[in-house]
Image: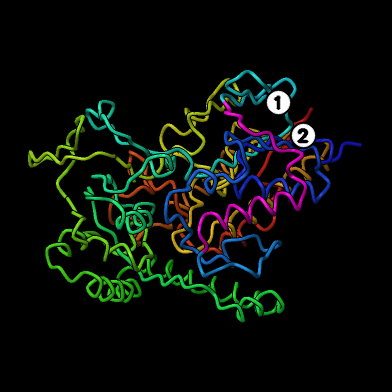
Amino acid sequence: MNTASDTRVVVVGAGFGGIAAAIELRSHGITDVVILDSAPEIGGTWYYNAYPGAACDVPSHLYSFSFAQRGDWSRLCSPQPEILEYLQGVAKEYGLEEVFVPSVRVDTVRLDEDTMTWTVVAEDGRSWEAGAVVLATGQLNTPAIPAIPGADGFAGPQMHSARWDHEVDLRGKRVAVVGTGASAVQFVPAIAPEVGKMTIFQRSGNWFFPRKNRYYPPALRRVFRRAPGVMRFRRFFLKGYLESLTIMIRHPNTVGRLGRIYSTLFMRRQLRDPEVRRKAWPDYTFGCKRILFSSHYLPALERENVELVTDRVTGIEADGVRTEDGRHHPVDVLIWGTGFKTTEFMFPMDVVGRAGRTLQEEWSEGAHAHLGMTVPGFPSLFVLYGPNTNTSGGSIIVFLEAQVAYVRQALEETARRRAAAVEVRRDVEQASDRRLQAAFEGTAWTQCDSWYRDESGRIVANWPKYMEQYVRAVSRLDPTEYDFVSR
Protein backbone atom coordinates (compact mmCIF):
# COMPACT_ATOMS: atom_id res chain seq x y z
CA MET A 1 0.00 0.00 0.00
CA ASN A 2 1.29 3.44 -0.93
CA THR A 3 1.76 5.75 2.08
CA ALA A 4 3.06 9.27 2.55
CA SER A 5 6.16 7.77 4.15
CA ASP A 6 7.13 6.39 0.70
CA THR A 7 7.51 9.92 -0.70
CA ARG A 8 10.91 11.51 -0.84
CA VAL A 9 10.70 15.25 -0.22
CA VAL A 10 13.47 17.70 -1.10
CA VAL A 11 13.34 20.94 0.88
CA VAL A 12 15.30 23.85 -0.59
CA GLY A 13 16.25 26.28 2.15
CA ALA A 14 17.40 25.75 5.72
CA GLY A 15 15.91 28.78 7.42
CA PHE A 16 12.78 28.85 9.57
CA GLY A 17 10.59 27.59 6.72
CA GLY A 18 12.78 24.67 5.71
CA ILE A 19 13.35 23.60 9.30
CA ALA A 20 9.62 23.79 10.06
CA ALA A 21 8.82 21.70 6.98
CA ALA A 22 11.31 18.98 7.81
CA ILE A 23 10.15 18.73 11.41
CA GLU A 24 6.47 18.62 10.46
CA LEU A 25 6.96 15.95 7.80
CA ARG A 26 9.31 13.74 9.78
CA SER A 27 7.15 13.90 12.90
CA HIS A 28 4.21 12.58 10.85
CA GLY A 29 6.04 9.64 9.31
CA ILE A 30 7.31 11.29 6.12
CA THR A 31 10.94 10.63 7.00
CA ASP A 32 12.65 10.56 3.59
CA VAL A 33 13.44 14.28 3.67
CA VAL A 34 16.52 16.09 2.40
CA ILE A 35 17.26 19.76 3.18
CA LEU A 36 19.49 21.67 0.74
CA ASP A 37 20.93 25.11 1.32
CA SER A 38 23.55 27.31 -0.30
CA ALA A 39 25.03 28.20 3.09
CA PRO A 40 27.53 25.99 4.95
CA GLU A 41 25.30 25.99 8.03
CA ILE A 42 21.63 25.89 8.98
CA GLY A 43 20.08 29.32 9.52
CA GLY A 44 18.81 30.81 6.27
CA THR A 45 18.53 34.58 6.42
CA TRP A 46 19.77 34.54 10.01
CA TYR A 47 23.02 32.94 8.89
CA TYR A 48 23.67 35.54 6.21
CA ASN A 49 22.39 38.68 7.96
CA ALA A 50 25.15 39.03 10.53
CA TYR A 51 25.72 42.78 10.22
CA PRO A 52 26.35 44.90 13.35
CA GLY A 53 23.10 45.46 15.22
CA ALA A 54 21.23 42.71 13.35
CA ALA A 55 18.09 41.69 15.25
CA CYS A 56 14.47 40.78 14.66
CA ASP A 57 11.85 43.48 15.19
CA VAL A 58 9.22 40.88 16.11
CA PRO A 59 9.26 39.83 19.80
CA SER A 60 11.12 36.54 20.21
CA HIS A 61 8.36 34.77 22.12
CA LEU A 62 6.32 35.00 18.90
CA TYR A 63 9.22 34.89 16.46
CA SER A 64 9.90 31.27 17.41
CA PHE A 65 8.22 27.93 16.90
CA SER A 66 5.15 27.24 19.01
CA PHE A 67 6.44 23.69 19.58
CA ALA A 68 9.91 24.83 20.64
CA GLN A 69 9.39 27.70 23.03
CA ARG A 70 12.39 29.13 24.83
CA GLY A 71 12.19 30.82 28.20
CA ASP A 72 15.64 32.37 28.25
CA TRP A 73 15.55 34.94 25.46
CA SER A 74 17.76 37.77 26.63
CA ARG A 75 15.38 40.56 25.61
CA LEU A 76 12.13 41.41 23.86
CA CYS A 77 13.56 41.28 20.33
CA SER A 78 16.61 39.07 20.15
CA PRO A 79 19.80 39.80 18.20
CA GLN A 80 20.95 37.70 15.28
CA PRO A 81 23.37 35.44 17.19
CA GLU A 82 20.60 34.34 19.58
CA ILE A 83 18.16 33.64 16.77
CA LEU A 84 20.75 31.66 14.81
CA GLU A 85 21.68 29.69 17.94
CA TYR A 86 17.99 28.99 18.58
CA LEU A 87 17.29 27.78 15.04
CA GLN A 88 20.37 25.58 14.91
CA GLY A 89 19.52 24.23 18.37
CA VAL A 90 16.01 23.28 17.26
CA ALA A 91 17.41 21.59 14.15
CA LYS A 92 19.82 19.58 16.31
CA GLU A 93 17.09 18.65 18.80
CA TYR A 94 14.97 17.20 15.98
CA GLY A 95 17.88 15.41 14.31
CA LEU A 96 17.89 17.50 11.15
CA GLU A 97 21.66 17.65 10.89
CA GLU A 98 21.56 14.13 9.45
CA VAL A 99 19.36 15.21 6.52
CA PHE A 100 20.95 18.62 5.88
CA VAL A 101 23.22 19.01 2.85
CA PRO A 102 25.19 22.28 3.04
CA SER A 103 26.73 24.43 0.32
CA VAL A 104 24.27 23.44 -2.40
CA ARG A 105 23.31 26.14 -4.86
CA VAL A 106 20.26 24.78 -6.67
CA ASP A 107 20.27 25.56 -10.38
CA THR A 108 17.24 23.67 -11.71
CA VAL A 109 14.11 21.97 -10.39
CA ARG A 110 12.52 19.97 -13.23
CA LEU A 111 9.40 17.81 -13.45
CA ASP A 112 9.39 14.45 -15.28
CA GLU A 113 5.76 14.10 -16.38
CA ASP A 114 6.12 10.40 -17.19
CA THR A 115 7.01 9.50 -13.61
CA MET A 116 5.60 12.58 -11.88
CA THR A 117 8.85 13.08 -10.04
CA TRP A 118 11.09 16.10 -9.64
CA THR A 119 14.83 16.30 -10.20
CA VAL A 120 16.71 18.95 -8.25
CA VAL A 121 20.06 19.80 -9.82
CA ALA A 122 22.79 21.84 -8.13
CA GLU A 123 25.22 24.14 -9.92
CA ASP A 124 28.04 21.67 -9.22
CA GLY A 125 26.17 18.84 -10.94
CA ARG A 126 24.84 16.96 -7.93
CA SER A 127 21.20 15.96 -8.18
CA TRP A 128 18.32 14.61 -6.08
CA GLU A 129 15.10 12.98 -7.21
CA ALA A 130 11.90 13.55 -5.25
CA GLY A 131 8.18 12.93 -5.29
CA ALA A 132 7.63 16.41 -3.86
CA VAL A 133 9.64 19.62 -3.55
CA VAL A 134 9.26 22.33 -0.92
CA LEU A 135 10.82 25.66 -1.89
CA ALA A 136 11.61 27.41 1.37
CA THR A 137 13.88 30.18 0.09
CA GLY A 138 11.49 32.90 1.27
CA GLN A 139 11.18 36.52 0.18
CA LEU A 140 14.22 37.97 1.98
CA ASN A 141 16.82 35.82 0.34
CA THR A 142 18.61 37.45 -2.60
CA PRO A 143 20.35 40.79 -1.94
CA ALA A 144 19.27 43.64 -4.19
CA ILE A 145 21.89 46.11 -5.42
CA PRO A 146 20.63 48.85 -7.73
CA ALA A 147 22.22 49.24 -11.14
CA ILE A 148 24.07 52.49 -10.50
CA PRO A 149 26.70 53.42 -13.09
CA GLY A 150 30.28 52.97 -11.92
CA ALA A 151 29.62 50.67 -8.97
CA ASP A 152 32.08 48.08 -10.27
CA GLY A 153 34.79 50.71 -10.40
CA PHE A 154 34.67 51.71 -6.74
CA ALA A 155 38.23 51.36 -5.40
CA GLY A 156 37.45 50.64 -1.77
CA PRO A 157 35.64 47.79 -0.02
CA GLN A 158 31.93 47.48 -0.70
CA MET A 159 29.37 45.09 0.76
CA HIS A 160 25.67 44.42 1.08
CA SER A 161 24.26 44.30 4.60
CA ALA A 162 23.24 40.66 4.06
CA ARG A 163 26.81 39.72 3.13
CA TRP A 164 28.67 41.79 5.71
CA ASP A 165 32.46 41.64 5.53
CA HIS A 166 33.65 41.65 9.13
CA GLU A 167 37.28 41.87 7.95
CA VAL A 168 36.73 45.48 6.85
CA ASP A 169 37.83 47.89 9.57
CA LEU A 170 35.43 50.83 9.65
CA ARG A 171 37.17 52.78 12.40
CA GLY A 172 37.83 56.32 11.27
CA LYS A 173 36.75 55.60 7.70
CA ARG A 174 34.47 57.64 5.46
CA VAL A 175 31.50 55.34 4.95
CA ALA A 176 28.67 55.65 2.46
CA VAL A 177 25.38 53.89 3.23
CA VAL A 178 23.05 53.57 0.25
CA GLY A 179 19.51 52.77 1.36
CA THR A 180 17.57 53.31 4.58
CA GLY A 181 15.46 50.17 4.95
CA ALA A 182 15.07 47.88 7.94
CA SER A 183 18.66 46.59 7.86
CA ALA A 184 20.24 50.04 7.58
CA VAL A 185 18.08 51.24 10.45
CA GLN A 186 19.83 48.63 12.61
CA PHE A 187 23.44 48.83 11.44
CA VAL A 188 23.67 52.65 11.08
CA PRO A 189 23.42 53.39 14.84
CA ALA A 190 25.65 50.37 15.56
CA ILE A 191 28.57 51.59 13.45
CA ALA A 192 28.07 55.38 13.55
CA PRO A 193 30.15 55.86 16.74
CA GLU A 194 33.23 54.19 15.24
CA VAL A 195 33.35 55.58 11.70
CA GLY A 196 35.05 58.85 10.83
CA LYS A 197 32.26 60.18 8.61
CA MET A 198 29.03 58.51 7.50
CA THR A 199 27.00 59.71 4.54
CA ILE A 200 23.56 58.11 4.26
CA PHE A 201 21.83 58.24 0.88
CA GLN A 202 18.07 58.05 1.34
CA ARG A 203 15.47 57.53 -1.38
CA SER A 204 12.49 57.91 0.96
CA GLY A 205 11.99 58.28 4.70
CA ASN A 206 10.32 55.80 7.03
CA TRP A 207 7.56 55.87 9.59
CA PHE A 208 8.90 54.75 12.97
CA PHE A 209 7.58 53.31 16.19
CA PRO A 210 9.78 53.14 19.31
CA ARG A 211 11.61 49.97 20.28
CA LYS A 212 13.18 49.96 23.73
CA ASN A 213 14.82 46.56 23.57
CA ARG A 214 15.90 46.22 27.18
CA TYR A 215 17.30 43.04 28.71
CA TYR A 216 14.80 40.88 30.58
CA PRO A 217 15.56 40.87 34.33
CA PRO A 218 16.76 37.45 35.60
CA ALA A 219 13.62 37.09 37.75
CA LEU A 220 11.35 37.55 34.73
CA ARG A 221 13.35 35.05 32.71
CA ARG A 222 12.92 32.52 35.51
CA VAL A 223 9.15 33.07 35.32
CA PHE A 224 9.24 32.44 31.57
CA ARG A 225 11.18 29.20 32.07
CA ARG A 226 9.10 27.83 34.94
CA ALA A 227 5.57 28.97 34.08
CA PRO A 228 4.43 27.71 30.66
CA GLY A 229 1.08 29.41 31.15
CA VAL A 230 2.80 32.78 31.26
CA MET A 231 4.53 32.00 27.96
CA ARG A 232 1.26 30.99 26.30
CA PHE A 233 -0.44 34.17 27.49
CA ARG A 234 2.51 36.24 26.28
CA ARG A 235 2.29 34.74 22.79
CA PHE A 236 -1.45 35.41 22.75
CA PHE A 237 -0.89 39.02 23.86
CA LEU A 238 1.87 39.60 21.29
CA LYS A 239 -0.31 38.27 18.49
CA GLY A 240 -3.00 40.76 19.38
CA TYR A 241 -0.51 43.62 19.67
CA LEU A 242 1.01 42.91 16.27
CA GLU A 243 -2.38 42.49 14.65
CA SER A 244 -3.10 46.07 15.72
CA LEU A 245 -0.53 47.18 13.13
CA THR A 246 -2.46 45.34 10.45
CA ILE A 247 -5.65 47.05 11.60
CA MET A 248 -3.94 50.41 11.06
CA ILE A 249 -2.79 49.42 7.59
CA ARG A 250 -6.15 48.01 6.59
CA HIS A 251 -7.99 51.11 7.79
CA PRO A 252 -5.72 54.07 6.94
CA ASN A 253 -8.43 56.72 7.25
CA THR A 254 -9.52 55.75 10.77
CA VAL A 255 -7.30 53.60 12.99
CA GLY A 256 -4.37 54.31 10.70
CA ARG A 257 -4.58 58.00 11.57
CA LEU A 258 -4.07 57.15 15.23
CA GLY A 259 -0.96 55.19 14.30
CA ARG A 260 0.31 58.11 12.25
CA ILE A 261 -0.23 60.52 15.14
CA TYR A 262 1.64 58.23 17.53
CA SER A 263 4.49 57.82 15.05
CA THR A 264 4.61 61.58 14.37
CA LEU A 265 4.88 62.47 18.06
CA PHE A 266 7.63 59.90 18.56
CA MET A 267 9.62 61.01 15.51
CA ARG A 268 9.35 64.71 16.40
CA ARG A 269 10.75 63.96 19.85
CA GLN A 270 13.64 62.04 18.31
CA LEU A 271 14.48 64.57 15.58
CA ARG A 272 15.27 67.94 17.12
CA ASP A 273 17.16 69.38 14.14
CA PRO A 274 14.51 70.82 11.77
CA GLU A 275 16.63 70.27 8.64
CA VAL A 276 17.36 66.63 9.45
CA ARG A 277 13.70 66.16 10.35
CA ARG A 278 12.64 67.61 6.99
CA LYS A 279 14.93 65.25 5.10
CA ALA A 280 14.05 62.13 7.10
CA TRP A 281 10.30 62.67 7.09
CA PRO A 282 8.26 60.19 4.98
CA ASP A 283 6.08 61.60 2.21
CA TYR A 284 3.63 58.70 1.85
CA THR A 285 0.64 57.20 3.66
CA PHE A 286 1.41 55.69 7.04
CA GLY A 287 1.57 51.90 6.67
CA CYS A 288 2.00 51.84 2.90
CA LYS A 289 5.60 50.73 3.37
CA ARG A 290 7.03 48.73 6.24
CA ILE A 291 6.71 50.49 9.60
CA LEU A 292 10.09 50.35 11.32
CA PHE A 293 10.84 49.92 15.00
CA SER A 294 13.85 51.77 16.36
CA SER A 295 14.65 54.19 19.15
CA HIS A 296 18.26 54.66 17.98
CA TYR A 297 18.28 55.30 14.23
CA LEU A 298 16.79 58.80 14.11
CA PRO A 299 19.08 60.18 16.85
CA ALA A 300 22.04 58.73 14.90
CA LEU A 301 21.12 61.00 11.98
CA GLU A 302 21.88 64.03 14.16
CA ARG A 303 25.40 62.94 15.11
CA GLU A 304 28.14 65.36 14.05
CA ASN A 305 29.81 62.70 11.89
CA VAL A 306 26.61 61.70 10.06
CA GLU A 307 25.06 63.39 7.03
CA LEU A 308 21.70 62.47 5.51
CA VAL A 309 21.54 63.06 1.75
CA THR A 310 18.24 62.92 -0.12
CA ASP A 311 19.51 63.85 -3.59
CA ARG A 312 19.36 60.88 -5.96
CA VAL A 313 22.56 58.89 -6.45
CA THR A 314 23.55 59.14 -10.11
CA GLY A 315 26.91 57.39 -10.12
CA ILE A 316 29.60 55.63 -8.16
CA GLU A 317 33.18 56.77 -8.71
CA ALA A 318 36.45 55.21 -7.65
CA ASP A 319 36.69 57.39 -4.56
CA GLY A 320 33.09 58.33 -3.81
CA VAL A 321 29.45 58.81 -4.69
CA ARG A 322 27.99 61.36 -7.12
CA THR A 323 24.49 62.75 -6.56
CA GLU A 324 22.01 64.46 -8.84
CA ASP A 325 22.96 67.93 -7.61
CA GLY A 326 26.45 67.35 -9.02
CA ARG A 327 28.07 66.94 -5.62
CA HIS A 328 30.87 64.41 -5.10
CA HIS A 329 30.84 62.66 -1.73
CA PRO A 330 34.28 61.17 -0.97
CA VAL A 331 34.10 57.78 0.76
CA ASP A 332 36.39 54.89 1.64
CA VAL A 333 33.82 52.13 2.17
CA LEU A 334 30.49 51.56 0.42
CA ILE A 335 27.67 49.69 2.19
CA TRP A 336 24.49 48.72 0.37
CA GLY A 337 21.46 48.79 2.66
CA THR A 338 19.13 48.27 -0.28
CA GLY A 339 17.25 45.18 0.85
CA PHE A 340 16.31 42.15 -1.19
CA LYS A 341 14.78 41.08 -4.48
CA THR A 342 11.53 40.37 -2.67
CA THR A 343 9.37 39.83 -5.74
CA GLU A 344 11.68 37.23 -7.31
CA PHE A 345 11.24 34.63 -4.56
CA MET A 346 13.36 31.55 -5.48
CA PHE A 347 14.71 32.98 -8.74
CA PRO A 348 17.17 32.81 -10.50
CA MET A 349 16.59 29.11 -9.78
CA ASP A 350 15.02 27.53 -12.88
CA VAL A 351 11.77 25.73 -11.97
CA VAL A 352 10.32 23.72 -14.89
CA GLY A 353 6.85 22.18 -14.65
CA ARG A 354 4.35 20.67 -17.08
CA ALA A 355 5.10 20.85 -20.81
CA GLY A 356 8.43 22.51 -20.07
CA ARG A 357 6.74 25.67 -18.82
CA THR A 358 8.88 27.52 -16.31
CA LEU A 359 7.70 29.20 -13.16
CA GLN A 360 9.18 32.42 -14.54
CA GLU A 361 6.79 32.12 -17.49
CA GLU A 362 3.85 31.29 -15.23
CA TRP A 363 4.62 34.37 -13.16
CA SER A 364 5.43 36.69 -16.07
CA GLU A 365 2.47 38.92 -15.14
CA GLY A 366 3.08 38.72 -11.40
CA ALA A 367 3.74 35.99 -8.86
CA HIS A 368 0.67 34.08 -7.68
CA ALA A 369 -0.08 30.87 -5.81
CA HIS A 370 -3.14 29.36 -4.14
CA LEU A 371 -2.84 30.31 -0.46
CA GLY A 372 0.70 31.37 -1.30
CA MET A 373 1.83 27.76 -1.70
CA THR A 374 0.62 25.88 -4.80
CA VAL A 375 0.79 26.83 -8.48
CA PRO A 376 -1.14 25.16 -11.33
CA GLY A 377 1.15 23.27 -13.68
CA PHE A 378 3.61 22.42 -10.92
CA PRO A 379 2.29 19.27 -9.22
CA SER A 380 3.60 18.40 -5.74
CA LEU A 381 5.66 21.59 -5.67
CA PHE A 382 5.05 23.80 -2.64
CA VAL A 383 6.30 27.31 -1.92
CA LEU A 384 6.75 28.49 1.68
CA TYR A 385 6.65 32.23 2.41
CA GLY A 386 5.50 32.51 -1.19
CA PRO A 387 3.41 35.10 -3.02
CA ASN A 388 1.18 37.20 -0.76
CA THR A 389 2.20 35.58 2.51
CA ASN A 390 4.40 38.31 3.95
CA THR A 391 3.04 39.97 7.09
CA SER A 392 3.37 43.69 7.77
CA GLY A 393 2.10 43.31 11.33
CA GLY A 394 2.85 39.84 12.62
CA SER A 395 5.25 36.91 12.77
CA ILE A 396 6.10 34.95 9.65
CA ILE A 397 6.73 31.94 11.90
CA VAL A 398 2.97 31.75 12.54
CA PHE A 399 2.43 31.61 8.77
CA LEU A 400 5.16 29.03 8.21
CA GLU A 401 3.85 26.62 10.85
CA ALA A 402 0.40 26.78 9.27
CA GLN A 403 1.86 26.27 5.79
CA VAL A 404 3.95 23.20 6.59
CA ALA A 405 0.93 21.52 8.22
CA TYR A 406 -0.99 22.19 5.00
CA VAL A 407 1.82 20.71 2.88
CA ARG A 408 1.86 17.62 5.07
CA GLN A 409 -1.91 17.21 4.65
CA ALA A 410 -1.53 17.49 0.87
CA LEU A 411 1.08 14.72 0.79
CA GLU A 412 -0.97 12.51 3.10
CA GLU A 413 -4.09 12.95 0.95
CA THR A 414 -2.08 12.18 -2.20
CA ALA A 415 -0.85 8.95 -0.64
CA ARG A 416 -4.31 8.03 0.65
CA ARG A 417 -5.65 8.27 -2.91
CA ARG A 418 -2.63 6.31 -4.22
CA ALA A 419 -1.95 9.19 -6.59
CA ALA A 420 1.38 10.18 -8.05
CA ALA A 421 1.08 13.90 -7.36
CA VAL A 422 -1.25 16.67 -6.25
CA GLU A 423 -1.89 19.79 -8.33
CA VAL A 424 -4.05 22.81 -7.60
CA ARG A 425 -6.81 23.41 -10.12
CA ARG A 426 -6.20 26.49 -12.25
CA ASP A 427 -9.74 27.80 -11.85
CA VAL A 428 -9.44 27.50 -8.07
CA GLU A 429 -6.10 29.30 -8.00
CA GLN A 430 -7.30 32.09 -10.29
CA ALA A 431 -10.46 32.65 -8.26
CA SER A 432 -8.57 32.75 -4.96
CA ASP A 433 -6.07 35.20 -6.45
CA ARG A 434 -8.87 37.53 -7.57
CA ARG A 435 -10.37 37.49 -4.08
CA LEU A 436 -6.99 38.11 -2.52
CA GLN A 437 -6.11 41.07 -4.74
CA ALA A 438 -9.57 42.58 -4.15
CA ALA A 439 -8.92 42.50 -0.40
CA PHE A 440 -6.20 45.17 -0.83
CA GLU A 441 -8.74 47.77 -1.92
CA GLY A 442 -8.95 50.69 0.48
CA THR A 443 -5.84 49.70 2.43
CA ALA A 444 -2.65 51.70 2.93
CA TRP A 445 -0.71 49.14 0.89
CA THR A 446 -2.24 50.51 -2.32
CA GLN A 447 -1.31 54.15 -1.68
CA CYS A 448 2.37 54.23 -2.65
CA ASP A 449 5.10 52.26 -4.37
CA SER A 450 6.94 49.76 -2.19
CA TRP A 451 8.92 46.53 -2.21
CA TYR A 452 5.60 44.73 -1.75
CA ARG A 453 4.85 45.37 -5.45
CA ASP A 454 6.38 44.01 -8.64
CA GLU A 455 7.26 46.12 -11.67
CA SER A 456 3.64 46.14 -12.88
CA GLY A 457 2.42 47.52 -9.56
CA ARG A 458 0.76 44.28 -8.47
CA ILE A 459 1.14 43.58 -4.74
CA VAL A 460 2.80 40.16 -4.66
CA ALA A 461 4.46 40.10 -1.25
CA ASN A 462 1.84 40.74 1.42
CA TRP A 463 -1.15 38.92 2.86
CA PRO A 464 -3.94 41.55 2.88
CA LYS A 465 -5.70 40.35 6.02
CA TYR A 466 -4.81 39.15 9.52
CA MET A 467 -2.57 36.36 10.77
CA GLU A 468 -5.40 34.35 12.24
CA GLN A 469 -7.41 34.59 9.02
CA TYR A 470 -4.51 33.02 7.15
CA VAL A 471 -4.11 30.28 9.75
CA ARG A 472 -7.80 29.44 9.45
CA ALA A 473 -7.68 29.52 5.64
CA VAL A 474 -4.95 26.87 5.49
CA SER A 475 -5.88 24.85 8.56
CA ARG A 476 -7.54 22.11 6.52
CA LEU A 477 -6.79 20.98 2.98
CA ASP A 478 -9.85 20.97 0.73
CA PRO A 479 -9.30 18.04 -1.69
CA THR A 480 -11.89 19.43 -4.13
CA GLU A 481 -9.49 22.30 -4.90
CA TYR A 482 -6.90 19.85 -6.28
CA ASP A 483 -6.41 17.27 -8.98
CA PHE A 484 -4.76 14.07 -7.81
CA VAL A 485 -2.66 12.83 -10.68
CA SER A 486 -2.71 9.10 -11.39
CA ARG A 487 0.42 7.08 -11.73
For the residues labelled 2 and 1, say whether their Cβ atoms are less than 8 Å apart: yes
Q: Is residue 59 left or right of residue 311?
A: right
Seen at 73% across and 37% down, the residue is 484
Q: Mark on residue 8? A: 2
To which residue does mark 1 refer?
128
* Residue 135 seen in the current view: yes
Quadrant that contains the C terminus: top right
Q: Mark on residue 151? A: none
Where does the image place residue 186, in percent across and percent down from the top left? Answer: 38, 57
Q: Secondary structure at mark 2?
A: loop
- Start and end of the magenta stretch? 78-106
**Closest to the observer, 182 or 196:** 196
**Closest to the observer, 376 or 350:** 350
Circle 2 or circle 1, nearest the eye: 1
Seen at 36% across and 38% down, the residue is 159
Seen at 58% across and 57% down, the residue is 397
Q: Magenta: predominant secondary structure element?
A: helix
Residue 400, placed above or below residue 330: below
Where does the image place residue 119, in percent across and percent down from the top left? Answer: 67, 24
| Disc 2 packing (10 Å; few <14; some 14–19; many ≥20) | many
**Closest to the observer, 225 or 68:** 225
State the colouring used for the structure image: rainbow
Seen at 12% across and 67% down, the residue is 274
Where does the image place residue 424, in percent across and percent down from the top left? Answer: 63, 40
Q: Amino acid at mark 2?
A: Arg
